[in-house]
Image: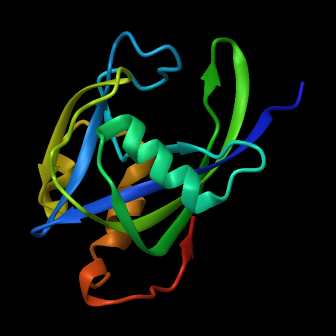
Amino acid sequence: MNPTLFLATKAFIEHEGKVLILREAEESPNATNKGKYHMPGGRIHPGEKWQEALRREVREETALEIEICSSFFVTEWRPVVRGEKWHIIGIFFNCLPKHTDVVLGEEHDDYQWIDPKTYKDYPLIENLHPVFETYLQLPLASDKNTVTLHHA
């Protein structure tokens, strides 16, 4: 059986030189990486504009409102969720928060604002390592409006 294909948007939310990571809760219904950190964001609903999807997902997961600055990385992953094979294409964006009062949704149980240079010190989902490596080569979102899109 072929996997179900999804498109997802993910946010590298920058504030004072740090980025926001979220830890997937043990009780999360779609959890495939329980106890590991990742970036806010998620799947685009059919008919939904990608910008609306990214803002919706960030708001649902963190209660933050964001400014989307630029895309900088595309990758894919293939989790098995509740016994179903998924194929997710993920696009990562530099974003700036309009405020920093994080309120976690039910899918996450912790958040951290981290120095992106120290990402290896956290139990991140492994497919984020090349995303962070690319991110570290970029100017801050607040310093540049457009960034070349990279892929893996």
Seen from the viewer's position, the closer of residues 51 and 14 is 51
Residue at the spot x=30%, y=78% of the render? 141
User: Going 24% across and 62% down the picture, which residue do you hit?
Assistant: 98
In the rendered image, the vertical position of residue 109 relative to residue 69, given as above or below: above
Q: Where is residue 66 drawn, in percent x and y?
A: 34, 61
Q: Nearer the viewer, residue 107 or 101?
A: 101
For the C terminus, the quadrant is: bottom right
- Which part of the image, by quadrant, shows the N terminus? top right
Give the image's coloring scheme: rainbow
Does residue 9 appear anywhere in the picture?
no
Residue 31 seen by the camera: yes
Q: Is residue 94 above or below residue 40?
A: below
Residue 132: give x, y in percent of width and height: 33, 62
Q: Is residue 8 left or right of residue 135?
A: right
- Compared across the picture, whether 23 is left or right of 129 comes to left
Q: Position of residue 86 (x, y in %)?
A: 70, 32
Splitting the image into 4 quarters, where does residue 88 fall? top right
Q: Is residue 64 above or below residue 150?
A: above
The image quadrant of residue 61 is top left
Q: Is residue 130 left or right of residue 136?
A: right
Where's residue 52, x and y in %? 56, 55
Q: Residue at x 19, y 61 (%)?
A: 116
